[in-house]
Image (cartoon, helix red, strand yellow):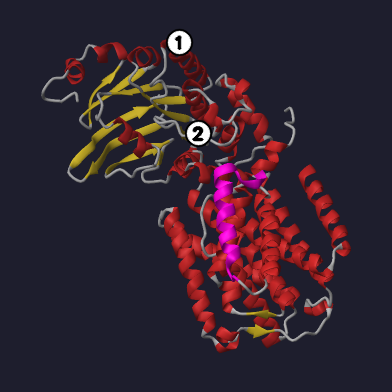
Amino acid sequence: MTAPLLQVRSVSRWFGGLRAVDEVSFDLHGHEIVGLIGPNGAGKTTLFETISGFMRPTKGTIAFDGRDITGQPPHRLARLGIGRTFQIVQPFRDVSVLENVIAGVVGPNRETPDPRAEAMAVLTRVKLDHRAAALARHLSLPEKKRLEIARALATRPRLLLLDEVMAGLTPAEIDEIMVILADIRREGIALLIVEHVMRAIMSLSDRLVVMANGRKIAEGLPASVAADPAVIEAYLGGRHHGAA
Amino acid sequence: MRPMLLLGVAVALLAGVAPLLSIYGQHIFVLVALYGSVALAWNILGGMAGQMSLGHALFVGAGAYVSTALYLHLGVSPWIGLVAAAVIGGALGAGMGYTVFRRQLSGVYFALITLAVAEMALHIVSNVAALGGANGLAIPSKPDFANFQFGSKLGFCYAALGVLAVVSAVILAIHRSRLGYVFLAIRENERSAAALGIDVVQGKVVASAISGALAALVGPVYAHYVLFIDPESVLGVPLSIDALLFAFVGGLGSLFGPLLGAAVLVPLTELLRGFLGGRLAGVHLIVYGVILILVMRLAPRGLWGLLLDSMPRRTK
């Protein structure tokens, strides 16, 4: 077995007295899709922010590709190969879709002989090439979600962190995203997905990590996790873990 | 390199037009080119990279004082002074940018600090005898190419046009390079920019340095054109406001809108001044205010936006 691509070791993030993330550890291997699920307020987004460098963990370490990346700024992580999307889509609104993606191509500051062609190829991968010339603010929500993925893909990540890219979409639109994500994985990019759309996360993920109240309460294959009493209690509102 | 070619043609055309103008027309030409250059330089930082400066007079003034002091006290040719001005302007821009942006301070703080630093510079220079204090520095008239005194307004038309061409070429080069996307991403959304591998602090510092260096180029040309500088004229708040105003009216963040803003507002100011004589000093500021409000109401993307909209859409 090769070393994990991402190693999260006892990561905690406190806000004053609140332990938003509390001693969470898990591994993610290359080519793997790991789903991160849990009730609202479980600490998923906070964990995301620490892995992508936007927040420094209060305690614990994070390693990527065997090297310690704890506390590194986000732009350096992006250059190392960790791409991410934002839960609330944040396109560059007043420029074209293509230019949004070109910014992703040239962002990591490496050799790019033809950024425009590379960006166009990425748009084709997420089936947004027909909208290349449109202003980003004129896109529909599902298109904006795909642009968010395209821009992250353009940085040529080895690990892509996706924060609720399916939220607010219709079942048909979710299916389209699922096809795109399956394609991305086939290209050899590992995915860590935070998602509330259970149907999607259950069928896409190789493994699930379940969080509640900042702690990891379960980890394993989707089917076994779904049958785990602790997980059911967290989701169905057991008093001890507080599903709110 | 088609845009660069286009720029070359535009500069050649303007150079061809300058000799045909009256002396007064040439005076306006010089002013538009110089104010336009300052506004374009301001726009690299304020428009393209989205970091508002309220103190760009600092760079113009630093450039003017550095080259003039070198010339008067050490006999250094203003041509070298021009290079020194750009270096000092760039260093000031980088230093100020690094001090503020490294601390993750938002745009408002940067705006206030630029204002404060420019004011500090004004008061410091006003109290340094070697720099003429509040009375300013007069440059003796010795028309000679080596002295950056051309003996005619036409010569200054070309000098000012030269600065404008340099500033424009740098803007085009930025626009077509990675740096253009770095500035765009920072302006639009810093979190997204960082997630795409862009060093946001570094990008802002670079924008500030380039903007400062280019604005500083205007100082020496202005100084040798007027043959006199004082703190109020080259370091004062009105110049800082002019740079920002021309950029806003012309089109914030657009490529050459700020030049368009200067080309409309500078002649207007001069006409008003001539029309009113000495009466109603400052009335041009009221006119500026009205124009600014009208532009914001009717053309939020500025005159440059209006121009683009009025052109037939090219099919891509």
> Disc 1 marks which residue?
A172
Residue at 59%, 71% in the rendered image: B281
The chain letter for the residue carrying disc 1 is A
Q: Is residue B198 visible?
A: no
In the image, which residues are magenta? B280-304
Residue B156, percent from left and from top: 79, 70
Q: Is residue B7 magenta-colored? A: no
Which chain does tag 2 point to?
A
Q: Quadrant of the C terminus of chain B?
A: top right
Q: Judge by depth and name the residue closer to the eye, A237 or A159.
A: A237
The N terminus of chain B - image quarter: top right
Task: Give the vertical position of B222 relative to A112 (above or below).
Answer: below
Q: Amino acid at mark 1?
A: Ala
Q: Quadrant of residue B24?
A: bottom right
Q: Is residue A42 above or below residue B132?
A: above
Give the overall secondary structure of the magenta segment: helix
Amino acid type, mark 2: Pro
- Residue bearing mark 2: A91
Q: Nearer the viewer, residue B125 or B136?
A: B136
